[in-house]
Image (cartoon, rainbow, N blue to C red):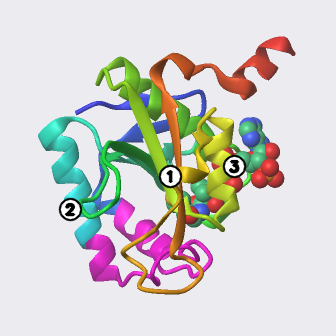
Amino acid sequence: MSVLRTDRLVLRDWRASDLDPWAAINADPVVRAYFPGVLTREQSAASVARFQTDLERRGWGWWAVEVAATGEFVGFAGLDPVDDGMPFGGVEAGWRLARPAWGHGYATEAARTVVSYAFGSLGLAEVLAVTAAGNLRSRAVMERLGMTRDPADDFDDPEFLEGPLRRSVVYRIRAGDHRPGGRWARARRGG
Ligand SMILES: CC(C)(COP(=O)(O)OP(=O)(O)OC[C@H]1O[C@@H](n2cnc3c(N)ncnc32)[C@H](O)[C@@H]1OP(=O)(O)O)[C@@H](O)C(=O)NCCC(=O)NCCS
């Protein structure tokens, strides 16, 4: 399977030692504010097994994200085919980090490499990202990646029968619009 590296992160396969911190991430109601509830440890364990199986089977999917300098596991980022039952198809990018790992640019850095992989190694023409309309932090990641939203794509997520999380937005980026270096890399190079 593919291991992806960025300046500060390693996107790699899952290890048994990731389960405790992954379960803690999914038990945090702030992390899960835009999802239907927190996850039990069993649900987190099942997700790790599923992610690892997908990575081994097709070489890509939801990678574990580690801070290269410390080896600390901080969450996940990756790609997955859009779930059946959504009003659109394609491959979506996603990210979820432990709260102490927010505010460092890690999600954008991981996502930019994931999107490069989608266009370069997988040869996709487009990558999507989907979130609850109110998830402004995730939408900011999408916008930093250069993704754009057409309000005509907004939809009601069938996972939520009702409530404020139901209204969801779709962001898209086409291969020709992707800038692998991105804003932060340019800023660093510029000094
Ligand atoms: C969505 C999520 C991953 C975004 O995390 P985030 O920390 O806001 O996003 P990034 O990792 O890209 O970090 C960007 C922030 O780091 C700051 N930053 C600090 N150092 C930085 C650096 N060296 N490089 C880049 N950005 C840096 C940026 O200024 C920005 O801060 P701001 O939010 O105050 O503008 C996080 O909120 C999360 O895990 N949420 C719960 C799960 C979830 O909703 N996932 C998405 C479902 S679709």
Q: Amino acid at mark 2?
A: Ala
* 127 up-or-down from 123: above or below: below
Please provide percent x and percent y for residue 101.
64, 56
Helix, strand or loop status at disc 1: helix
Looking at the image, residue 140 sits to the left or right of residue 188; the answer is left
Q: Gap in Å between the C-alphas at discs 3 and 1?
A: 18 Å
Question: Mark 3 sits on what residue?
Answer: 140
Looking at the image, residue 156 sits to the left or right of residue 67; the answer is left
Dot 2 or dot 1, earlier in sequence: 2
Q: Gap in Å between the C-alphas at discs 2 and 1?
A: 32 Å
Question: Mark 2 sits on what residue?
Answer: 49
Q: Residue at x 16, y 42 (%)?
A: 56
Pick the quarter of the image with the C terminus.
top right
Q: What numbered label is drawn on residue 153? A: 1
Does the rendering let one see residue 18? yes
Magenta segment boundaries in residue numbering: 18-45
Q: Find the residue positioned furthest to the right.
A: 191
* 37 up-or-down from 145: above or below: below
Dot 2 or dot 3, earlier in sequence: 2
